[in-house]
Amino acid sequence: MTKAYQEKVRELIGKKIFHIEWKKKNPKTGVFDVPRKGEFRLGVQKWKEKDGTKKKLAGGKRTTNPDQYLIAFDLAKRGFRNIKYDTINSIKADGEEYFISTIKFEDLLKALGIGR
């Protein structure tokens, strides 16, 4: 994915709560074909667990490529998730829903469009 595409996704999301639909990697086949959706937020540093325990980021080195993955805090599961940019199908943020279309051509993924 291009930097412009990644920046556009982050711009659409902002710092507020957002919903996203994407495809997760199937551990049996290695193909990104398992549909997922959830409610997320970017920039989370501290949070409370469901039992009231307070948590904060411990630090450490990122293990995924920032050009390929968006790291977001899953509000339902109370943890961080890696979402591959080129598997995002839709984003709902700030009262707007955006649908994302991509095409794969000779191992090069390009964003065809981001529209409402």
Image (tube, rainbow, N blue to C red):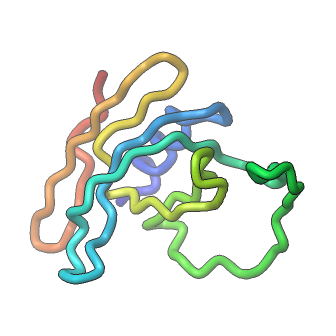
Residue nearer the viewer, 42 or 39:
39
Residue at 42% across, 41% down: 20
Q: Residue 59: where, in percent of width, then height?
A: 81, 74
- Outermost residue to the top: 95
Asked which quadrant contains residue 66, the reply is: bottom right
| Residue 100 against residue 6 in the figure, above or below | above
- Outermost residue to the front: 51
Asked which quadrant contains residue 25, the reply is: bottom left
| Residue 26 against residue 85 in the figure, above or below | below
- Outermost residue to the left: 105
Residue at 25% across, 37% down: 113
Rendered-image quadrant of the N terminus: bottom left
Q: Residue 92: where, in percent of width, then height?
A: 43, 29
Residue nearer the viewer, 62 or 31:
31
Is 26 on the left or on the right of 92, as rendered?
left
Residue at 49% across, 16% down: 95
Q: Residue 87: where, in percent of width, then height?
A: 30, 56
Is 48 on the left or on the right of 87, as rendered?
right
Residue at 63% across, 52% down: 73
Q: Count the marks: how many?
A: 0
Q: Residue 56: where, in percent of width, then height?
A: 85, 61
Rendered-image quadrant of the C terminus: top left
